[in-house]
């Protein structure tokens, strides 16, 4: 087991409002039904589960709290609860790991992490495995889907919209963020990434590196981690970073992604190099899976590798 301790707080939310859709994703119940909790307990984790429910929402409320960001108020309600769950877990010296649901949940999980670090003189480093940069803003996003903006909020954008998050302006240092697997970026997002010189290994760069990329990228992440003087590694793993042929069960699939075996090797090497102290797993949607449960198998393989 690669974690600092075996006290695992498994936090779940089935929210998918960040994709602009109503209803629950059904992800966590499907994973539990497939034996996730038993596997974790068999690995020796002292496991506690915490569920954050999505409030009742109707389609008429899509722009009730913002003229462009969809379902903003209920998303913020979920994220505020997630912020507290992550913060409380860290305060107890436990390992918080959040399973979604969509990537809008990271507004809350990163806020909880950053608030804890601010109070305890620590600094987080975030590895963002994803097909998308998720660093749009309220003005920059074309879709208005909140799952595309969490990192912008985390580094300090749109604080007039999210005033109760990231207390004392404790934002994420862009140099302590590293993208892996990116292959779908809006022009506005590309400008933000370049403006802040955010380390990035997009899919095109991984292809150039060849089969050795997991080793090379992890080595670079370790160098950046040490240079940034970070103390805590947080992995946010979006299943759509994996190629859709291995994981068809995501809402925003992008072709030509990371093969699942390489993604698992990357996670394994990352955990061997640095202790993983918190994380997220998002965008698994069982309702979009194929008849062979290909996406479910991929989700379980990723979680089995991360939580090991």
Image: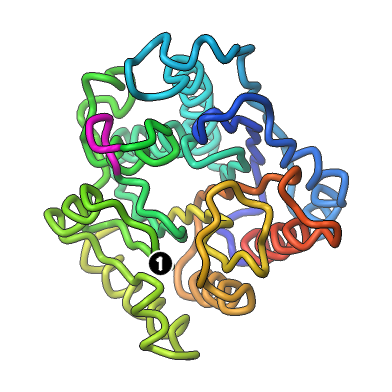
Quarter of the image where the N terminus is located: bottom right
Q: Note whether 10 is above or below 229 in the view shown.
A: above
- Asked whether the viewer can see residue 225, the reply is yes
Density class for disc 1 (Cα within 10 Å; few <14, some 14-19, many ≥20) is: many
Q: Position of residue 16 (x, y in %)?
A: 58, 33
Q: Tell me where the magenta segment starts and ends, as one range.
A: 136-141
Q: How is the image coloured?
A: rainbow
Q: Is residue 138 magenta?
A: yes
* Residue projecting furthest to the left: 195
Secondary structure mostly seen in the magenta stretch: loop
- Dividing the picture into quadrants, the one containing residue 243 is bottom right
Is residue 169 covered in magenta?
A: no
| Image spot of residue 132 (x, y percent) | 40, 55
Q: Tell me: residue 12, above or below residue 217.
A: above
Whether residue 201 sits left or right of residue 199 in the image: it is right
Q: Quadrant of residue 100?
A: top right
Q: Is residue 242 above or below residue 70?
A: below
Left or right: 219 as drawn, with respect to 285 = left
| Residue nearest the observer in this picture, 62 or 233 | 62
Q: Would you say residue 112 is visible in this rendering?
A: no
The residue that appears at 43% across and 23% down in the rendered structure is 70
The percent coordinates of residue 273 (x first, y second) are: 46, 75
Q: How many marks?
A: 1
The quadrant where residue 99 appears? top right
Q: Observer-nearest residue: 224 or 258?
A: 258
Residue designated by label 1: 180
Q: Residue at x 63, y 36 (%)?
A: 11
Provide the secondary structure element on which disc 1 rests: strand
Residue at the spot 22% in from the left edge and 52% down from the top edge: 187
Name the image quarter holding the C terminus: bottom right
Q: Residue at x 75, y 52 (%)?
A: 289
């Amino acid at each position: 087991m690669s974690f600092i301790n075996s006290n695992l707080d498994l936090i779940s939310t089935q929210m998918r409002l960040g994709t602009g859709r109503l209803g629950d994703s059904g992800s966590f119940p499907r994973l539990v039904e497939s034996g996730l909790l038993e596997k974790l307990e068999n690995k020796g984790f002292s496991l506690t589960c915490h569920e954050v429910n999505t409030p009742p929402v109707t389609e008429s409320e899509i722009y009730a709290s913002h003229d462009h960001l969809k379902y903003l108020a209920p998303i913020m309600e979920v994220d505020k609860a997630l912020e507290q769950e992550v913060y409380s877990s860290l305060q107890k010296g436990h390992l918080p790991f959040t399973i979604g649901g969509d990537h809008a949940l990271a507004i809350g999980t990163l806020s909880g992490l950053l608030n804890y670090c601010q109070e305890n003189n620590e600094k987080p480093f975030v590895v963002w495995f994803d097909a998308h940069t998720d660093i749009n803003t309220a003005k920059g996003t074309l879709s208005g889907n909140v799952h595309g903006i969490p990192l912008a909020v985390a580094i300090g954008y749109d604080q007039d919209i999210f005033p109760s998050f990231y207390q004392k302006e404790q934002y994420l240092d862009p140099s302590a963020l590293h993208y892996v697997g990116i292959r779908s970026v809006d022009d506005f997002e590309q400008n933000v990434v370049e403006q802040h010189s955010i380390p990035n290994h997009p899919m095109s760069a991984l292809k150039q590196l060849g089969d050795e990329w997991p080793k090379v990228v992890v080595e670079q992440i370790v160098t950046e981690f040490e240079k940034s003087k970070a103390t805590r590694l947080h992995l946010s793993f979006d299943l759509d970073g994996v190629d859709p042929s291995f994981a068809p069960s995501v809402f925003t699939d992008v072709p030509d992604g990371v093969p699942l075996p390489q993604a698992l090797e990357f996670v394994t090497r990352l955990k061997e190099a640095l202790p993983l102290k918190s994380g997220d797993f998002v965008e698994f949607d069982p309702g979009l899976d194929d008849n062979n449960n290909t996406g479910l198998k991929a989700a379980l393989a990723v979680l089995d590798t991360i939580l090991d």
